[in-house]
Amino acid sequence: MASVRRTQLGLRAPGRTVSQGAMASAGPSRGTKAPQRAVSASDVPRRSDASMRVLLRVRGTAAAGESVLATHGTRGTDVDVLGDVPSSSRGAARSRTYGYDCVLSAEADQNMVYSEAMQGVLEDVLLGYNCTVFAYGQTGTGKTHTMEGDLSEYMETFAPDAGVIPRTLYRLFHVLETRGDDYGVKVSLVELYNEELRDLLSDDVSSAPLRMYDDARGRGVVLQGLEEVPLTSAAHGLRLLREGSQRRHVASTKCNQQSSRSHCVFTLTVHVKESGVRGEELMRTGKLNLVDLAGSESIGRSGAEHQRAREAGLINQSLLTLGRVIHALVEGSTHIPYRESRLTRLLQDSLGGRAKTCMIATVSDDRLNLEETLSTLDYALRAKSIKNRPEANQRMTRAALLKEYVGEIDRLRSDLSATRTQTGVYVSEANWARMEAEQASLCKQLDEQRRANEVATSRLASMQEQLEQNTRVLAKREADAARAEAEQAARLHELEQALCHAATLSTTLQEETRLHHAHAASERKLDQVAHELRQLAEQATDDVHGLFAKLERRAKADAQARAALTTLADELRETHEAVAASAAVQVPEALSQLVDHVSRELWALQQVLDDRLAAAARAGDDSGTALRDEVAHAMSEYEARLLHAHAEACAAWQTAQEAHVGEVAALLAASERMTQSVDAHLSKLHGQASTLLAHAQSSSARVRAQSREHAEAWAQQQQALRGGAESMRAAMLAAMDAFVQQQVQAMQQHEQAAHDTFRAAKPADTQALCASHRTAWEAAHADLSSVSNELSDACVALHASAQDLAPRADAHDQHFAHEMEAAAAQWRATTGPLWERHSSVEAVAQSAQGAADEVRTTLAALDLRAEASAVLEAATHVQDASGEAAERLQRLQGLLGPLAPMPEATGETPRRRTWSMPVWDVVPSDRTEALAWWEQAADRTPLRERRPVENRPLIATPHK
Ligand SMILES: Nc1ncnc2c1ncn2[C@@H]1O[C@H](COP(=O)(O)OP(=O)(O)OP(=O)(O)O)[C@@H](O)[C@H]1O
């Protein structure tokens, strides 16, 4: 850096006479001896035709949808006129589509206009060309806005809404600084008001209008007395422009509050020093004219009167002449009417001359202005066809420059002396005066040039000294800049981290939202489960009622059976008692009668026998013995008959008894079976009732336990969720505050440091750094704001969601508890009577069991076989009693039929059914599991997988 030596050559203009148009082109004067020039191959000016570049800028003043112009994108090349297109004032048909080098829509900003208009222009100026950019258009369409815009300074650079001129100033100085050339920049500002030229940079406001005359060397026109101010920086140039603009003639019209009433030319002359092939010092000079024309206006519509109307007339006049010049150039006329107005004289070199020219045509898209808009479109289209012959200015040595001035003075002197000695030409008094003035001016210029030279030499030395100082400052500043950049990088890193954290927070927020949704889904599910449980309970209650009805029917049947059994037992007892009584009475009676009868028979027989034997004995007859034998025989026959009859009776009685016993046994077996079936039925019923009760109890207990568990889990989750959301919100707010605080502090420090550095440094050198810092600051600020906005949005959303969740969770808790309580009450109401019924059924079963046992005991006690064997001998009598007993048994058997009648099928008994309990898959209490549950339930990609966050979050997840 230290080896680069730059010098500001922008000293005050040596003379106050400036050639306009070719703008002090350093070319040789015609007819005079060419001054010494540097000669090199590259010095030969290039000559080639170049069309004038034409840009169109549309100002959007029409209401939405009512624009008469349609552009194609912000930056296109065509514009379409919508609706009917009236023909031109000359009756020529007009096009509906116009094509230009660039068409900027109403959305295009100042920067876009600048970059399109100045494309390659500064480079050309630095190569030694004269360039002109001028704005043309109807009043109020934004010419001044385009060329000047906002002229204030903003953070040591141009304002965001600055126009072409401020941006050009800053860009020019930036390029010159960056290239490291020795350069000098001068500026002039002139207005053409009512056909009079005024120097807007002159402090003397009452000074006479500037005189304009053709340069004696054929280099356009010369504005006598115009001040060219050397610029030290872009800010300096901007300040001069601001001051000059304030002196410009403006007035309020109906079309524009701040209507420019004059044409204004801002000229930058740039000298760049370079070395010739032989190492000599050469000056390359380029000029840039930035022209803001006054707007064409319809006097009727602008409401101009008196002074304003005169101004408008002259403005329109000069613009008409400009139009004619353009027309003549396009048509290739031999005569171009440059001299018809001062404006066209001023712009002569830019219109078909050696300069490179760009026109910015401004139009409004309002239908009210259609006629003026079409006129401007036609005007601009014609101007597009103008061909210039750009030619770079010759490079000249400083000495050649001086020599040129001296030669000019000598020439004038000799003219003067020739005139004085009457050997020269005669000049008129007016011309004499003019020439004298010119000579005086040239002398003065020469003198000033000499003095300036001296000043420049001493200033050069001091500047060299200053340069060294500046180089040191620059080195220091570069170090500062590097430090600032490092700090900025650190800030950016922090910002990235913050963005990462914001992303993490956003993920966490999304997770919270998902959890919230999961809980809401759970809530719905639980509602549904409670509803299903209630339905189930109601169904179970109905079934239990049905079962009770069946039990009642069964109990009735059992009561009937019990009554039949009791009757049977009574009948049996009666039969037994009757048989026993009959056996006890009739059998001994029959036996005693039998014994009596046999005894009597035997006694009678004994009597007969004894009589016979006695007779026989008395008769001495042996026939007694025969009789005795006969009697004995008869008796033994009788006995045998008797025994046989007895045996037969016994056998018959035995058979009858056995039949009776078999029937009784069958009866017993039947009643045994019936008792067993009643027992089995009762025990089955008992088992069923117990199972039902146990099932009811266990399911009720399970439901209650599960409900309690889920209610507790739910409450815990709600608590955790609420706590988590609160703490996350607090953490986010704290982190956000800390981050914002930190960023603001860092920015302030950074800004302070940059400020200090910039203040210590050369203003022109700081521009780039300032701009870059500003951009970085703005970007960082924008990032910060967006992060901050995102975080606050996230916080607000989280808070809102937490707020929203809390009352819903409470309501759900209450609702769920209420539902569970109702379900439990329902179960209790269902199982209570069931239990009571079960107890009563058990009591009934027990009493039935007792009755059955009693019958069994009674039957066991009824040992008819023993009784029967005891009465074997009283067969005849017992036969009657047995017959009677058989009849009674017959009757008992008749009773056995309805003993155990099965209840009639009513079709009301509930069928066996499969109970399906609702599924209780609710959100688990663990956060990770809950998220996995939600993702699995909806087959979603896990959030963490979708957007992996590299950095560990600063703010811990509150649920962990
Ligand atoms: N593209 C634009 N965007 C925003 N405002 C604009 C635009 N063009 C012009 N304006 C505004 O419109 C008003 C008139 O613009 P300006 O003075 O530049 O018009 P003008 O063509 O120079 O008019 P005149 O010929 O009467 O001087 C100003 O307030 C200006 O800020």
Image (spheres, grey):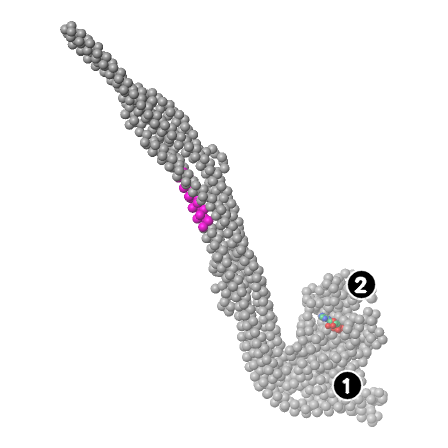
Check residue 431 for magenta coloring: no
Q: 10 Å neighbourhood of mark 1: few (<14), some, or many (≥20)?
A: few
Nearer to me, 119 or 839 = 839
- Secondary structure found at label 2: loop
Give the quadrant of ligand 1. bottom right
User: Three-letter amino acid code at disc 1?
Assistant: Asp
Do residues under tags 2 and 1 come within 8 Å of each other at their CB atoms? no
Mark 2 or mark 1, earlier in chain? 2
User: Three-letter amino acid code at disc 2?
Assistant: Pro
Q: Quadrant of residue 108?
A: bottom right
Instruction: Please report the residue visible at 38 percent of the width from the left and 30 percent of the height from the top.
Output: 570
Instruction: Please report the residue visible at 75 percent of the width from the left and 85 percent of the height from the top.
Output: 203
Q: Which residue is mark 1?
A: 204
Residue 709, given in percent of the width and then of the height, sits at: 47, 55
Q: Residue furthest bottom?
A: 421
Q: Quadrant of residue 858?
A: top left
Q: Is residue 335 left or right of residue 832?
A: right
Q: Is residue 583 left or right of residue 233?
A: left
Instruction: Please report the residue visible at 72 percent of the width from the left and 80 percent of the height from the top.
Output: 242
Residue 220, given in percent of the width and then of the height, sits at: 76, 81
Residue 891, given in percent of the width and then of the height, sits at: 39, 25
- Mark whose residue sits in front, 2 or 1: 1
Task: Give the magenta part as a residue range.
Answer: 682-701
Name the chief secondary structure element in magenta.
helix
- Secondary structure found at label 1: loop
> Tag on residue 86?
2
Check residue 683 for magenta coloring: yes
